[in-house]
Image (spheres, rainbow, N blue to C red):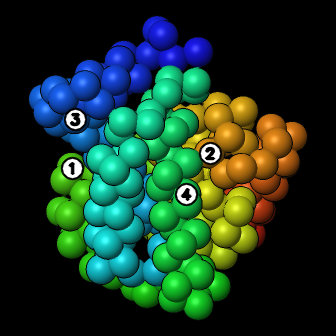
């Protein structure tokens, strides 16, 4: 499946010792991956830790990487697992601390170019961000993997360890809840 995936080819080159291939992968995925993690874990410090852990696992597993799916699917599965590990360690149920949005954007390095970031501007964006925070963790992950990660429903299922129908349901419920939350908050 990964034969036509340029990122998978880069990962294979990296596994073979080409450090520049890793640099290209990191540059291609760092912003969207950071945004996914930032919207999945409680605070900015935890985001940085989980982000670093994710890339550390990519490095640690480079020699065992096999392009059976798109590289992005593999990467976001690692990110999802790192987020799950963080939640287990912290004992939190997905609550988020309020962070300075400028610091968040700066740490992400031009995060404003992402599709979700563009939607999160202004008052409507604040309502959307609040609605995202209220989603159950699994639904939020499915939505963010779709929007930020660009994963298909099947890839979301693979990344989160569920079948595609479950991933599809989680994504559908997330969208429905977000529409309801934004509709309820809309001015009359």
Q: Is residue 88 left or right of residue 48?
A: right
Return the disc, 4 or 1, that comes first in the chain's sequence: 4
Mark 2 and mark 4 residues within 8 Å of each other at the beta carbon: yes
Foreground label between 2 and 1: 2
Closest to the observer: 138 or 16? Answer: 16
Residue depicted at x 16% and y 26%: 18
Residue 180: name its quadrant.
Answer: bottom right
Return the disc, 2 or 3, that comes first in the chain's sequence: 3
Q: Position of residue 36 (x, y in %)?
A: 45, 56
Residue corresponding to mark 2 = 159
Mark 2 and mark 1 residues within 8 Å of each other at the beta carbon: no
Real-space CA distance between mark 4 and mark 3, rounded to the nearest whole angstrom: 20 Å
Closest to the observer: 154 or 59? Answer: 59
Residue depicted at x 48% and y 10%: 3
Foreground label between 4 and 1: 4
Return the disc, 1 or 3, that comes first in the chain's sequence: 3
Which SS class for mark 3? helix
Residue 112 in view in this figure = no
Question: Which numbered dot is residue 22?
Answer: 3
Residue corresponding to mark 1 = 110
Above or below 1: residue 83: below
């Amino acid at each position: 499946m990964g034969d036509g995936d340029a990122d998978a080819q880069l990962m294979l080159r990296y596994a073979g010792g080409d450090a520049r291939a890793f640099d290209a992968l990191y540059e291609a995925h760092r912003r969207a991956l950071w945004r996914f993690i930032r919207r999945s874990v409680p605070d900015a410090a935890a985001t940085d830790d989980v982000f670093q852990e994710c890339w550390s696992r990519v490095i640690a597993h480079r020699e065992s990487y096999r392009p059976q799916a798109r590289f992005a699917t593999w990467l976001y599965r690692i990110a999802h697992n790192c987020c799950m590990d963080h939640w287990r360690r912290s004992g939190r149920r997905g609550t988020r601390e309020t962070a300075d949005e400028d610091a968040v954007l700066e740490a992400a390095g031009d995060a404003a170019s992402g599709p979700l970031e563009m939607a999160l501007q202004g008052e409507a964006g604040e309502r959307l961000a609040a609605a995202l925070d209220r989603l159950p963790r699994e639904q939020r992950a499915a939505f963010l993997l779709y929007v930020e990660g660009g994963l298909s429903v099947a890839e979301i299922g693979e990344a989160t360890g569920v079948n595609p129908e479950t991933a599809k349901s989680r994504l559908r419920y997330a969208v429905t809840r977000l529409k309801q939350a934004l509709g309820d908050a809309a001015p009359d």
